[in-house]
């Protein structure tokens, strides 16, 4: 019996490993290049991924954040990648996004009201709650950890299960699927046909 969670056999490495649209495993990380389209493996759980997501990954080097603050965005590096999530991981991502957005709105609303009423302790609690919610929401929403982007290659840290699934997929022999020829049914002879 086939494993329903196994990645499909027809997906393979797209492009060259270091060329445009490629990916490979290196040192326990998944390395993707600009425009990579990953196989139908859930990038969070390592099961079969059904929900497609295209995302632009942005990484700002630590030196740029420390020395230039908001201007550090000028030193940002970007890579666009298409990946897949299982239904469970996709739900987790949407919950994380809702927690992040709700924390931001509630923190601004409660904190703003507390400042207007000069309730400084409540304003501080609202600010801390907002920051906590943003961190937790972002952690839950992101299916992988972006370690860095160098020379147009993004280095992603995956869960052990997802990493094993990508390793298994990469170790499978790459075979081309043969198309089966359809047999044509013989048409019954009709009366009056002279053949």
Image (cartoon, rainbow, N blue to C red):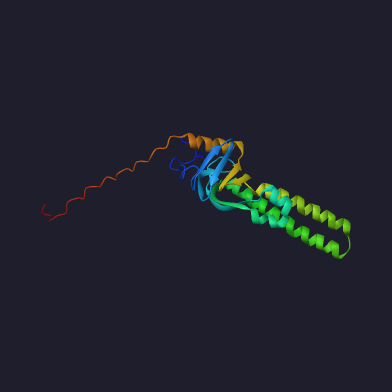
Viewer-side residue, 178 vs 21 = 21
Q: Position of residue 125 (x, y in %)?
A: 83, 54
Q: Determine whether, in the image, residue 180 is placed left or right of residue 116.
A: left
Q: Position of residue 68 (x, y in %)?
A: 72, 54
Q: Residue at x 54, y 50 (%)?
A: 81
Q: Quadrant of residue 114?
A: bottom right
Q: Determine whether, in the image, residue 126 is placed left or right of residue 11.
A: right
Q: Residue at x 80, y 60 (%)?
A: 110
Q: Is residue 163 above or below residue 97?
A: above
Viewer-side residue, 182 vs 24 = 24
Q: Quadrant of residue 121?
A: bottom right
Q: Determine whether, in the image, residue 53 is placed left or right of residue 131.
A: left
Q: Quadrant of residue 155?
A: top right
Q: Residue furthest bottom?
A: 116
Q: Position of residue 76 (x, y in %)?
A: 63, 53
Q: Residue at x 68, y 47 (%)?
A: 139
Q: Residue furthest left?
A: 194
Q: Position of residue 91 (x, y in %)?
A: 62, 49
Q: Residue at x 49, y 37 (%)?
A: 170
């Amino acid at each position: 019996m086939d494993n329903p969670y196994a990645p499909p056999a027809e997906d393979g490495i797209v492009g060259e490993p270091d060329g445009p649209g490629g990916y490979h495993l290196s040192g326990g990380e998944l390395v993707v290049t600009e425009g990579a389209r990953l196989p139908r493996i859930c990038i969070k759980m390592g099961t079969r991924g059904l929900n497609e997501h295209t995302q632009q990954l942005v990484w700002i080097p630590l030196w740029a954040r420390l020395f230039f603050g908001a201007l550090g965005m000028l030193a940002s590096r970007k890579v666009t990648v298409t990946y897949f999530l299982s239904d469970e991981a996709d739900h987790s991502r949407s919950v994380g996004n809702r927690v992040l957005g709700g924390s931001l709105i509630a923190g601004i609303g409660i904190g703003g009201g507390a400042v207007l009423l000069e309730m400084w302790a409540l304003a501080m609690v609202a600010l801390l709650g907002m920051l906590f919610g943003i961190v937790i929401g972002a952690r839950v929403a992101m299916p992988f950890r972006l370690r860095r982007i160098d020379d147009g290659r993004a280095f992603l840290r995956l869960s052990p299960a997802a990493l094993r699934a990508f390793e298994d997929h990469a170790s499978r022999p790459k075979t081309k699927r043969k198309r089966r020829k359809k047999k044509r049914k013989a048409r019954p002879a009709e009366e009056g046909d002279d053949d």
